[in-house]
Amino acid sequence: MKILVCISVVPDTTTKITFTDNDTQFNKTGVQFIINPYDELSLTRALEITEANGGSVTVITVGEADTEPVIRKALAMGAGDAIRIDAQPKDGMYVAAQIAEQAKIGGYDFILTGRESIDYNGGQVQGLIAEMLNWPLINVVMKLDAEGNTIKATRDIDGGRESLSVDLPVVISAQKDLCEPRIPNMRGIMMARSKPLNVVVASDKNDYTSIASYELPPAKSGVKMIDAENAEELIDILHNTEKLF
Amino acid sequence: MTEAEINSLKESGKGKDTYNQPDFYNIDDLLSDEHKMVRDSVRSYVKRELSPIIEECAQQNYFPSHIVKQLGEVGCFGPQIPAEYGGGGLDYISYGLAMQELERCDSGIRSTASVQGSLVMYPIHKFGSEEQKRKFLPKLGSGEMLGCFGLTEPDHGSNPNGMTTHFTEDGDSIILNGAKMWISNAPEADVAIVWAKNPDGIVQGVIVERGMEGFTTPTTHGKWSLRASITGELVFDNVRIPKSNILPKVTGLKGPLTCLNSARYGISWGALGAAMDCYESARKYASERHQFGRPIGGFQLQQKKLAEMLTEITKAQLVCWRLGNLMNNGKATPAQISMAKRNNVEIAMNIAREARQMHGGMGITGEYPIMRHMMNLESVVTYEGTHDIHLLILGMEITGENAFT
């Protein structure tokens, strides 16, 4: 089993978001970057599966050189090697096309992604990769096991769960609860120094969309406390000021 | 505490620890990406496994022995020991950062790791035979074995050379007699590095193993400090030990003192961790607690406290970083380490006390970590060379005059 885990490098969840260039660029200054938490789950589960059943785990990202400390963390967690496609990730189509091409070159038979990246929340890459490779996709999986070449996955559906079975090759995207993300240990951190991080030149692929502008959500207006005795005032505000009914 | 209690605490405490260290002088710029990864790893581990349970452990005077294996898995035991012997193969700054993150949680947890890494693995690695290294280090590194270090005796604390624990020789064995006191990890330790006088009166290190006849480890009860770690005595009543358990590469007090240097170095980082936790707690409390219609952080006396805390923390951070580089280059002197240990523990105690006052009545409860840190630091200022002894080490360094005796 040759697993390729797609890693997106995203701002830490506590980042204060600002924009530059007339609100068309995300301001990276002073921002701490991390492995996309859903990708961390898929990587952890990939490592657990190969540790139990044999196989290899390679991580791949589309990103510039500043993503390398985050890729090293993926190696410290236990991935055997890494591929960095040297380009700024544009839209989902662009990223998927780059990864699909490397997946073919490397002869992988199992691709894991997160359900979405927590920065742009596109959730497209896994579906696009599957389509480009003509592989099946099981999306948003919260339980995952491998038996030989058969993958068993469980996902939440409306009002219940479904369990699926599929033979390799396949693309799977991870949802929370898949596993507890692995914390890199000291030895892993030391070993990550000498693991291969291969930088490949990006292919000439189209990006079909471009960012016109960003805007922040409106500032929260705060909380107005109304005395519990004073229900009439509350109803008045909801009815007359907020016009909710 | 039962496993169910621990799991329930972990579940209810999930995500509540939002600690991030103050970094007023951008000292992170002086750290490598690898250093920051080490810190993040230990911090993530602490937040997930330790923060939710630590207060209850301390309140109940309970040593969470299940964490020994976890600390081994994360690599908190001897991160600076080469990987081929079960360590992490990292540098001294990584070691310091790991100790800082652990003590940010609790000095008792850091003590368990310091003892294992600096006082058990380090002497075996530095002074042990190849066979001893292969036999003990990987298991100590992984947390499969827990170790302790016996130097202090009931009647000999600051004056270790007066020790009375001794051994005689009998064929391929030695016979060990005596007692050691205030020994972290002792009651649960599988091995003890014991410093004892040989028949010529010269101090040597001996690896004493659990199960050897005549070797017992009674628990020290009634501690108001380091309540989440376990402390005890080591009692040797005609313990027969193979000569192959003697550490072959060192004689004299240089042996234990070299180990203490490594441990004191870790404490200088660790105590700063406790200080930063107190500061962060006080800073947040000052913005949340309102009196006279506004946050107490808006009042000058509270601001003075916070400003002074941050100043001392920043100075201590620089001391740690510089000392770490000296350690990495093999250039740190015992007196330099004494200065860092002494200063950082002192500022941590002062910051804990000021932070306690800023929290008002809440500061004395287990809702906040302050009082626990404060009580823990009373041990930290005493062990591994008391506050006063470190002054004398510095005094001797400055003047060339020995004021110890």
Image (tube, rainbow, N blue to C red):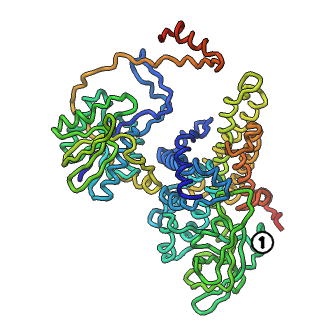
Residue A103 is situated, as x and y percent measured from the top left of the image, at 22, 42
For label 1, the residue is: B156
Say if A241 sits above or below B205 in the image.
above
User: Along the line of sight, which residue is nearer the eye, A65 or B353?
Assistant: B353
How many discs appear? 1
- Callout 1: helix, strand or loop? loop
Say if A61 sits above or below B152 in the image.
above
What subunit carries mark 1? B
Residue B18 is situated, as x and y percent measured from the top left of the image, at 56, 39
Residue B158 seen in the figure: yes
Decide if residue B81 is on the left or right side of residue A154: right
How many neighbours does mark 1 have within 10 angstroms: few (below 14), some (14-19), or many (20 or more)? some
Residue A44 is situated, as x and y percent measured from the top left of the image, at 37, 49
Q: Residue at x 71, y 38 (%)?
A: B309
Decide if residue B29 is on the left or right side of residue B198: left
Say if B178 sits above or below B323 in the image.
below
Say if B182 sits above or below A97 in the image.
below
Q: Residue furthest top?
A: A240
Q: Amino acid at mark 1?
A: His
Residue A108 seen in the figure: no
Q: Residue furthest left?
A: A134
